[in-house]
Image (tube, rainbow, N blue to C red):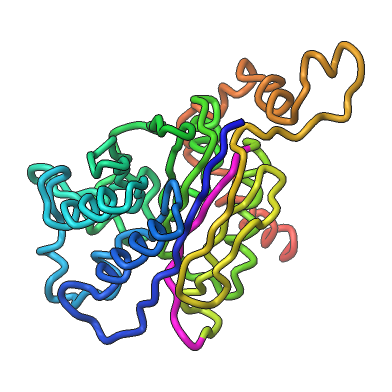
Amino acid sequence: MRPARLATASILHDDPPSYPSRCLERCLEMIDRAGDARADIVLLPEEPDVVGCDPAYLSQLPEPIPGGDTLAQFAQRASDNNLYVAYSQREQDGEKVYNTGVFLDRKGDLMGKYRKMHLAPGEEDEVLPGDLGYPVFECDFGRVGMGICMDIHYPEMWRILALKGAHLLLFPTMCIDYTGDHIESIVNARAIDNQVYLASSHFVMQPFLAGRSMGHSRIVDPYGRTLANTSHRPGLTFADVDLDAGYETWYTGEQKERYPTLKDCYLGMRRPDTYHELLDQQPESPAWQTAPDLAHAARDS
């Protein structure tokens, strides 16, 4: 068995912009609450230093990692509460700025970091794409990997994390979804595809209206089933899980011995020798761009 108590947070950001963002203090409070509940790890949303910050101060937010004040505050709370903490913040590395996922251990020490690879439209004006690959971090309860916000739409990176042995995947985000159905479906799919537990952490605005930050931070099992959900409210939610628990396949006999669980099946029956087209450069006229033109031409002819 590989037992773990997972915690994830929805952070309120309804206030007028401020500097620093009030979201930071709320994240620190959530770490304390997760510690009181004896969680092993708590996930917080994407860039709480940016969300809710007065735009006039955005250029002052990037900090070195390690070495910045924001990291120091989160590290102290991780140590005080004897739990792992994961979140993302703006990182300054020389002249470069990144949206960086941070992993802190139970002592508050920096285990490592992940720099967001897939930037949302317009985000490239503020930060650079990541350059640290797709790391997996060894915690005392299992191996953990992260993708940030826009990363959720690119299944290749999540498969890489699973192939590296991740038991738990983390998804901090500031995404806005009109109903929540879109993001929830994708999160479920990533968990099912890779047969891992997956936790998401969102911001929330109240009252909830379509097109605003929706909350619904969740913990999902490898079957894509929701184990815990903050709903449209700020707060924490928890799930006690066995990260070694696998879902049996429906096979019998020799095939059952070869592929006893769905993870063995899904990861073990891959055909990487046929995936070379994924590595090809984008064609000059991508099909997903030309297809609508062809449809219009057929309609108008």
Give how far across and how far down residue 169 sits, in percent: 50, 42
Reply yes or no: does residue 259 show up in magenta: no
Identify whether 31 is placed above or below 13: above
Magenta stretch, main secondary structure, is: strand
Left or right, 46 with respect to 283, comes to left
Residue 197 colored in magenta in the image: yes
Residue drawn where x is 47% and y is 79% of the image: 212
Image: 186 above or below 167? below
What is the x, y in percent for residue 238? 54, 58
Relative vertical location of residue 14 with respect to residue 224 in this rendering, above or below: below
Magenta stretch, residue numbers: 196-207
Residue 278 or residue 85, whichever sits in front: 85
Residue pictured at 61% horizontal, 60% vertical: 228
Question: Seen from this angle, which residue lies furthest top?
Answer: 254
Q: Tell me where residue 242 sits by quadrant.
A: top right
Quarter of the picture holding the N terminus = top right
> Residue 282 vs residue 249: left or right?
left
Q: Nearer the viewer, residue 279 or 70?
A: 70
Q: Nearer the viewer, residue 138 or 300?
A: 138
Residue 103: image quadrant is: top left
Please give the name of the residue rendered at 10% of the width and 46% of the height, measured from the top-left corner. Answer: 67
Give the total number of marks visible in the rendering.
0
- Position of residue 277 in the picture relative to residue 43 (left or right): right
Residue at the (52%, 26%) spot, across then down: 165
Please identify the residue farthest to the right as the structure is shown: 252
Q: Indicate the position of residue 156 as horizontal and vertical percent values.
A: 53, 35
Residue 9 locus on image (x, y percent):
44, 63
Please identify the quadrant where the C terminus is shown. bottom right
